[in-house]
Image (cartoon, grey):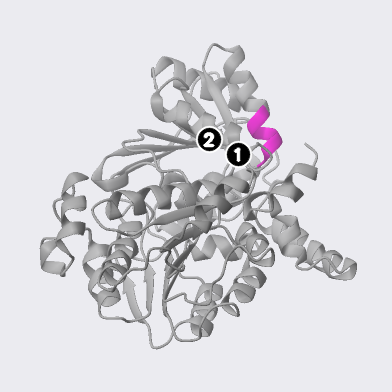
Amino acid sequence: MTFKMLGLSDALLKAVSKQGYETPSPIQKKAIPAVLEGHDVLASAQTGTGKTAGFTLPLLHILSQSERSKQPPIRALILTPTRELAAQVHDNVKQYSQFTQLKSAVIFGGVNQKPQVAVLNRGVDVLVATPGRLLDLHSQGVVSLKQIEILVLDEADRMLDMGFLRDIERLMNLMPVKRQNLLFSATFSKEIKKLANGILRKPVVVEATPENSTVDAISQKVYRVAKGKKTGLIIKLISEGNWTQVLVFTRTKHGANKLCKKMVSSGISAAAIHGNKSQGARTKALAGFKAGTIRVLVATDIAARGLDIPLLPHVINFELPNVSEDYVHRIGRTGRAGASGEAISLVSADETVFLRDVEKLVGLKIPVSIVEGFEPDPNASTEPVKQGQGRQRKQTTRKASTKGTKKGSGSGLRNRFSDDQGRGGQSKRRKG
């Protein structure tokens, strides 16, 4: 199977060849023909298996086949949950469309909207956006969605987890009823299937891999360790292993900052990336990590879906996520595009339940090791940790939703997660 056999235009085939792609991935083989035939698509595939090209290439093909005006209306909208993912998807759109006449743009919050507005005013065929900033610009009369032909919801499961449902529903009402809808997700939850039923019309269901499975190329390992010794152990592993590019996940923003400082004080160049960081700081940290000037990037789950780092060798769960599905997305940052990778989890006694949930989800008994001097505390409680994100985050979301409604400020869900939904003004007012 070749990309040419999928029926893509010469301009797209040229762009694909320039990127070094030779054969389509399983998700691309299944999704691209379905999209080209005009079907609505519900697709599930592991992160790092080529989902973006799976919807971007056929989308660009369809748009390029019709005449284009000098100042085109927005004809295709790609919604993403985070700024980093929006930027990454737009980079892909630009790469694939470079030999066509199509114009694209990306908009998200946390940055000045003026440059984004200027680009939109010149006309855009394909828009990549986070929901909050898109709604803001629409309310200002800057964006019109009346001529949308194709809608893509990328990482739809993360959008629901972050409380975007009401925003998505509002955006739907601003678009033509007759349009092609593509819903791409790493997992198929009950909530995703419910969302799909309300959006998609007789969809073609595409699954490239079993639900919630982990990439075979990823070597997974658990280190049992006392909670208070985790920082020492992770520094030992990185230093003695001479690892030069390590992505580390924590449950909280405070935890990410604290660990980052410990790394730096131990002589390991590190940067933190999470929702409280400005967009400029996040972009700088990610650029430094990719360039190799920053050795360790410490992130919260907000960053798990938007980071695309080629040949990333190591991912470390400094703390296991409260929601086991997030484990799949975290370790999916390595082992991408056929490359091998290592995923390590540092597990203390109070994370025993989380580990059991993860192993049940991925259908694998993960090998366990203990490092001398960093042994687990035999007297520590195995009661799950109480703080963090995950399920408690959803409870906070519901409270915030009620509070927002009482104040007449619109969706409380949107207010709670304004930092990554794209409401630049709100995120500036937030403290911390």
Residue at the image point whose x is 47% and y is 47% from the top:
87
Q: Position of residue 110 (x, y in %)?
A: 65, 44
Alpha-carbon span between mark 2 and mark 1? 6 Å
Quarter in which the C terminus is drawn:
top right
The residue beneath circle 2 is 283
Q: Is residue 28 left or right of residue 353?
A: left
Residue 279 image label: 1
Q: Which structural element holds mark 1? A: helix
Q: Is residue 266 left or right of residue 334?
A: right
| Residue 338 in the image: above or below residue 173 | above
| Residue 155 in the image: above or below residue 366 | below
Asked if residue 375 can be seen in this view, the reply is: no
Quarter in which the N terminus is drawn:
bottom left
Q: Is the residue marked by circle 1 packed among few (<14), some (14-19), or many (20+) residues within 10 Å? A: many
Of all residues, the one furthest to the front in this rendering is 70
| Residue 181 in the image: above or below residue 358 | below
Q: Which structural element holds mark 2? A: helix
Q: Is residue 92 left or right of residue 320?
A: left
Residue at the image point whose x is 64% and y is 60% from the top:
137
Q: Position of residue 140 (x, y in %)?
A: 68, 63
Q: Which residues are magenta?
A: 252-257
- The answer to whether the residue labelled 2 contacts the one labelled 1, judged by CB atoms less than 8 Å apart, is yes
What is the three-letter code of the residue carrying label 1? Gln
Magenta segment, prevailing SS (helix, strand or loop):
helix
Q: Quadrant of residue 165?
A: bottom right
Q: Position of residue 148 (x, y in %)?
A: 46, 74
What is the three-letter code of the residue carrying label 2? Thr
Residue 249 lies in magenta, yes or no?
no
